[in-house]
Amino acid sequence: MVSRKKKKDTGPMPAASAGLLRFFEEETEGVKMRPELLVVFAVSLIVISVLAKVFFPV
């Protein structure tokens, strides 16, 4: 009889990328924000900066 190993719940990871794929699967702690919110924040910061430069020249 041939003994067979029990299958794991997850499949094997690809051998490429030197373990970088496994790194991105891990859950990290910190502030979670939607990408759309970050884009809106960045664009509004740029607009405020340009308006400040126009209305309050140094």
Image (cartoon, rainbow, N blue to C red):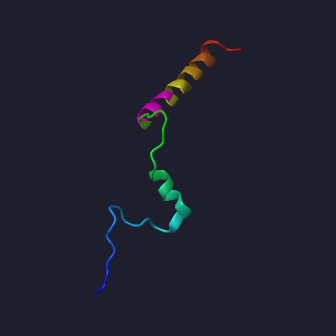
Asked whether 44 or 31 is in front, the reply is: 31
Asked whether 1 or 15 is in front, the reply is: 1
Q: Which residues are magenta?
A: 36-41
Q: Looking at the rendering, in which quadrant would you find the N terminus? A: bottom left
**Image-quadrant location for residue 18:** bottom right
User: Among all residues in the image, which is located at the extreme bottom?
Assistant: 1
Q: Residue at x 59, y 22 (%)?
A: 49
Vertical placement of residue 50 versus 14, above or below = above
Secondary structure mostly taken by the magenta-highlighted segment of the chain:
helix
Vertical placement of residue 55 versus 36, above or below = above
Vertical placement of residue 38 versus 53, above or below = below
User: Among all residues in the image, which is located at the extreme top?
Assistant: 56
Q: Residue at x 48, y 38 (%)?
A: 29
- The picture places residue 35, in percent across and down from the top left corner, at 43, 37
- The picture places residue 4, in percent across and down from the top left corner, at 32, 78
| Membership of 39 in magenta stretch | yes
- The picture places residue 12, in percent across and down from the top left corner, at 41, 67
Q: Looking at the rendering, in which quadrant would you find the C terminus? A: top right
Asked whether 18 or 40 is in front, the reply is: 18
| Membership of 4 in magenta stretch | no
Q: Is residue 17 left or right of residue 11?
A: right
- The picture places residue 40, in percent across and down from the top left corner, at 45, 29
User: Among all residues in the image, which is located at the extreme right?
Assistant: 58
Q: Residue at x 64, y 12 (%)?
A: 56
Q: Is residue 33 left or right of residue 51?
A: left
Query: Total marks drawn?
Result: 0
